[in-house]
Image (spheres, rainbow, N blue to C red):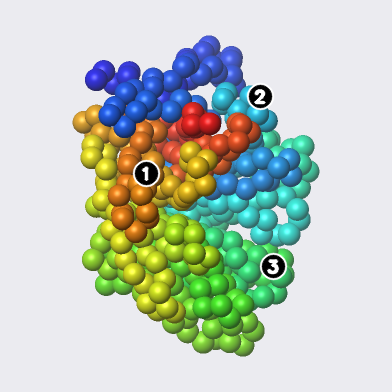
Amino acid sequence: MNKSHRMCSRAIAVPLLLLTAHWTAPSHAGQSKRGVAWACHVIDNTSRGADGTRLADVNGDGLPDITTGWEQGGVVRAYLHPGYPRVRAPWPAVTVGPAGSVEDAVFADLDGDGATDVVSACEGKVRTLFVHWAPKAKDRYLEAAAWKTEAIPASRNAQQWMFSLPLDINGDGRADLVAGGKNQNASVGWFALPPDARDSARWQWHALSRVGWLMSLFAEDMDGDGDRDIVLTDRRGDLRGCRWLENPGLGAAQTQPWVNHFIGGRDREMMFMVLADLDRDGALDVVAATTSDILWFHRAGRDVWQSVSIPLPDNVGTGKGVAVADINNDGRPDIVLSCENAKAEKSGVVWLAYQGNLADNRWQAREISGVPGTKYDMVVPSDLDGDGDLDIITTEEVENLGVIWYENPLR
């Protein structure tokens, strides 16, 4: 297939004086035995190497907004949902600041001023966490000059930072920041923020566990003791797999170690995971993508997990991102899978519906992306167009499709 046919909806070139506006052409749908690909809409493709999406409602309009780091472009951007009538056009956007080799960006109001900031995690030679402080005036949120970018001193050159998660660890009512990285000297831990979060020199790092290559971070009360533990996937190293770190409690208890509990997947290259009640028994399961399959971990006791391997569909890349959601509104949870290495006419995003009973582990794959992209990242279900079904938000890094969403046709 011609490379021009491997594109999602692309922005058409415009004169220099009109660079703030561009138009989206109809998407190339593509056909496979899994069905027709969903219509693809570009939120932004104006930089290089879009690498993951994190969502929050930053302006209080009840609609999901997005932040994304552009790894090769070296910038972090935020996007405001434009409202349902304009959702298929490129979204209003702001570059919140520079960040070289940025791997992750997440929304968080760290200083408690009511304006939602952005935290970026950088790997490569940058090896630093940055806070992009948002303007307090809501009407200036889309003004790049109103943002201030600041490196966190305690993070500089400590490790290749891969992911972060805002979370009140010490129970003081203010956000702290859980973060971690990969490769040499990598660990997962948390930064205790001072009363004035903008006093970045006073951020204190507390390492919790070694990691080889951190992929996912979630906060969840895994042991039912009332505090939130940390659940993660670790891609490589002697602690690889899916595991959770037990929160020792608040106050003085924070001086105690966070005990590691393995969930499974220690023989796999673990990628992204989600916490979801896949079997609808009232308890959270773990569903994780690996490079070779999807693992469903069903909890049978405090530290007893039953593992089910769900094979990857034919003619897709290697597993990367995963989500659990009711895609076709039939009342049953489905799985959405994104892939890397979706080369040679392989698909990069599909969804899977189980056939018969879930215990039969028979899944039918259905198309989402077709074959335009090569390297997709996290997949996030959200009803972006307000029509009552869940669309899929993701990024594609190699073909530079950018920040995109796929419109669910299954009403």
Q: Distance between the residues labelled 2 and 1?
A: 29 Å
Q: Position of residue 65 (x, y in %)?
A: 62, 41
For disc 1, the marked residue is 352
Q: Is mark 2 on a helix, strand or loop?
A: helix
Taking the spot 23% from the left edge, 37% from the top edge, the residue there is 315
Badge 2 crowding class, 10 Å Cα cut-off, few under 14, some 14 to 19, many 20 or more, is few
Tell me the amino acid under the disc marked 3: Arg
How far apart in space, not on screen, are marks 2 and 3 (Cα)? 37 Å
**Nearer-the-camera pick, 312 or 397:** 312
Q: Dot 3 lies on which element?
A: loop
Question: Which quarter of the image is occupied by the N terminus?
Answer: top left
Which mark is on residue 85?
A: 2
The residue located at (59%, 61%) in the rendering is 166
**Precedes in sequence: disc 2 or disc 3:** 2
Q: Name the residue under label 3.
A: 174
Residue 155 showing in the rendered view: no
Residue 380 appears at what percent x and percent y? 49, 45
Q: Is residue 61 above or below residue 406?
A: below
Closer to the eye: label 2 or 1 = 1
Q: State whether residue 301 appears in this view.
A: yes
